[in-house]
Image (cartoon, helix red, strand yellow):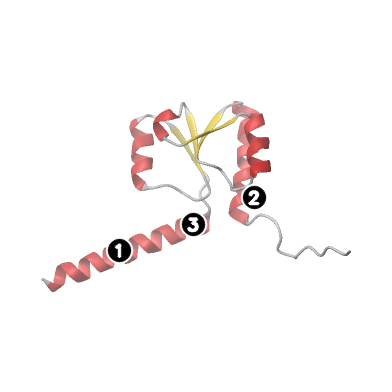
C-alpha cells in the first residue's frame, strides 16, 4: 500500500509559530502557563507539558507569564491579565486576529445602523 501525504499536510503558520515560540520560551523560563490548549494536538501538548507548559482554564490561575493560545481570547481576558500584572505572551494566529477585528468592526457598524434608525 502506498501512502501519499498532501503537500499542505501539517500545521498552519499560526500553529507552527506558536509551537516554536513556546518551545524557545520554555528553554529560558522552564515554566509558563497557557490559557487553554496551545494547539489541538495531544502529542505536541504532552511534549510541551513535559518541558514545563502548564495548561489552565482560568486566567486567575496563572502566575507570572501566560500564553494566549493560537485561537485567541476575549478582550475581557486581556483586561483581567493586566489587572493581575501578568506578562502576556500573545501567540494568537495573525489570521485569527484579523477575523476578530473584522467581527468587531462589523458589530460596531450594526450597532450604529440600528442606533441611527431610532
Element type where label 1 sits in the image:
helix
Q: Residue at x 33, y 32 (%)?
A: 83
Residue beneath disc 2: 16
Residue beneath disc 3: 96
Q: Quick check: 75 left or right of 2?
A: left
State which tag comes first along the sequence, 3 or 2.
Answer: 2
* 49 and 103: which is toward the camera: 49
Q: Position of residue 65 (x, y in %)?
A: 49, 31
Disc 1 + disc 3, Cβ < 8 Å: no
**On screen, 59 above or below 9?**
above
Gap in angstroms between the C-alphas marked 2 and 1: 31 Å
* Mark 1 neighbour class, 10 Å CA radius: few under 14, some 14 to 19, many 20 or more: few
**On screen, 60 above or below 93?**
above
Q: Quadrant of the N terminus?
A: bottom right
* Mark 3 neighbour class, 10 Å CA radius: few under 14, some 14 to 19, many 20 or more: some
Residue beneath disc 1: 107
State which tag comes first along the sequence, 2 or 1.
Answer: 2
Q: Residue at x 51, y 55 (%)?
A: 94
Q: Position of residue 82 (x, y in %)?
A: 36, 35
* 8 and 37: which is toward the camera: 37
Amino acid at each position: 500500500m502506498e501512502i501519499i501525504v498532501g503537500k499542505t499536510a501539517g500545521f498552519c503558520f499560526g500553529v507552527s509559530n506558536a509551537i516554536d515560540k513556546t518551545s524557545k520560551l520554555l528553554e529560558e523560563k522552564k515554566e509558563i502557563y497557557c490559557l487553554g490548549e496551545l494547539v489541538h494536538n495531544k502529542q505536541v501538548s504532552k511534549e510541551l507539558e513535559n518541558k514545563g507548559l502548564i495548561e489552565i482554564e482560568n486566567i486567575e490561575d496563572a502566575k507570572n507569564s501566560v500564553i494566549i493560545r493560537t485561537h485567541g481570547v476575549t478582550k475581557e481576558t486581556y483586561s483581567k491579565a493586566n489587572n493581575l500584572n501578568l506578562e502576556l505572551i500573545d501567540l494568537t494566529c495573525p489570521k485569527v486576529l484579523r477575523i476578530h477585528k473584522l467581527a468587531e468592526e462589523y458589530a460596531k457598524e450594526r450597532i450604529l445602523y440600528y442606533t441611527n434608525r431610532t
